[in-house]
Amino acid sequence: MKKLLLLLLLAIFAGSNGISQSCLPLGIQFHNQSDIDNFKTNYPGCTEVEGDVLIEEYGLITNLDGLATILSIGGDLRIKWNYYLNDLTGLANLTFVGGNLEICYNHSLETMDGLESLTEVGGNLLINSNSSLVDLGGLRSLKKMKGNLEIKLNDVLTVLSGIDNIAPGTIKNL
């Protein structure tokens, strides 16, 4: 009986590593690929970033794969000035952004692929000045927004399908 109880306790504690863990109440900034690649090592178990996440650099970030453990962001998510970022696939497990989601000035960004799990944005959604963006399909799971929607100066974006599942009345202005 004692062995069974011990095994049960070990199983419970071993399984606790899979539980979501909040971290970084002041947020985090990523300015190079190494910062992103080392996220899991530097912040083991971090799945819920409490503060803002800034992903910004002028040419050194090529993928977001190291951020695959993030499930939610309590503050803003700003992805700006990343010249060699083609998609957002490293954010495939992200379901919630509590503040604004800003995707701006990413001149190689072609799609929103990687945001397929995102269901809610608590603030504004800004998609501006992404000169290669052709597709918003990665946002197809987004159902709820509490702020404004702004999509402008995306030179080759002609079809807005991907944002058509947002529930009516959850966007302040379109």
Image: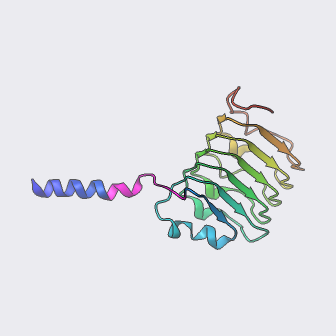
Q: How many marks?
A: 0
Q: Magenta segment range?
A: 14-24
Residue shown at 81% from the left, 61% from the top: 108
Q: Residue furthest front?
A: 26
Which percent across, then down, holds residue 75?
62, 49
**Looking at the rendering, which quadrant does residue 61 occupy?**
bottom right
Residue shown at 77% from the left, 38% from the top: 149
Which percent across, then down, holds residue 90?
62, 58
Q: Is residue 97 left or right of residue 58?
A: left
Magenta includes 69? no
Is residue 111 among the parts visible in the rendering? no
Residue shown at 81% from the left, 41% from the top: 150
Q: Is residue 121 above or below residue 165?
A: below
Q: Is residue 100 above or below residue 3?
A: above
**Looking at the rendering, which quadrant does residue 121 occupy?**
top right
- The quadrant in which the C terminus is found is top right
Report the coloring of the rendering: rainbow
Q: Residue furthest top?
A: 169
Q: Is residue 19 left or right of residue 78?
A: left
Is residue 160 among the parts visible in the rendering? yes
Q: Is residue 15 left or right of residue 84?
A: left
Magenta includes 21? yes
Residue shown at 15% from the left, 54% from the top: 4
Viewer-proximal residue, 75 or 165?
Answer: 75
Q: Residue furthest bottom?
A: 34
**Looking at the rendering, which quadrant does residue 58 occupy?**
bottom right
Which percent across, then down, holds residue 24?
54, 59
Q: Is residue 96 left or right of residue 5?
A: right
